[in-house]
Amino acid sequence: MNEPYQALAAITENCAPVTLLSFGRLGHTVAERWSEQHQCVITTLTPTEAKNELTLTHPQDLALITDTLEHLSVTQGQRLLGQLRNYGTRQIAVVLPENSAWTLTDFIALGFRREAVLQQTDRKFLLYTYNIESYNHKRTWNNPRFWANPERWGKHRW
């Protein structure tokens, strides 16, 4: 097996999705192998369908995106990833060639992390992941105690 496949299979195993969305050949392969062994509802979309507005009926546990972003403009890809996040997709894994137009900054701006540089024969691929549970670390000041102050409403003029 090649590294991109192994990485996506490991992410799928750790996530244990019940609903899985896949884009691209490798994403479909990993999704199909997972569904052979587990109860899972798979939605598959082509890179061409990724250019259009997504219409998902329910949030997905995991989205595997391969062979897709390199065929879209960065703006179209940002829209796709943003739509997946807005639909409540719990985890997203993206594999794309190292020499694509996408930069680390593009992914960081969307809340992704660069997980690995993967080797497949003579090509290198990058793995980026998004996890709704861990993309935004907790801050002590970011809670109602420090910003709402309902006990002061109507008592002070700002």
Image (tube, rainbow, N blue to C red):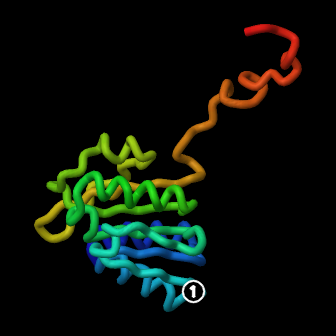
Q: Position of residue 134 (x, y in %)?
A: 56, 47
Residue wearing tag 1: 38
Residue 154 left/right relative to 38:
right
Tell whether 63 sits left or right of 137: left
List the single residue furthest toward the bottom. Answer: 36
Residue pictured at 57% horizontal, 75% vertical: 57
Q: Where's residue 151, x and y in %?
A: 88, 20
Horizontal and vertical percent position of residue 129: 42, 56
Above or below 76: residue 145: above
Q: Residue at x 43, y 86 (%)?
A: 33
Secondary structure under the numbered disc 1 in the rendered image: loop
Look at the picture and state if 147 lies above or below 93: above
Task: Please rate how many residues cluster around mark 1, counting C-alpha atoms within 10 Å: few if below 14, some from 14 to 19, many from 20.
Answer: few
* The C terminus - image quarter: top right
Q: Work out whether 143 lies above or below 107.
A: above
Q: Decide if residue 111 is on the left or right side of residue 47.
A: right
Residue 56 vertical placement versus 28 (above, below): above
Nearest the eye: 111 or 148: 148
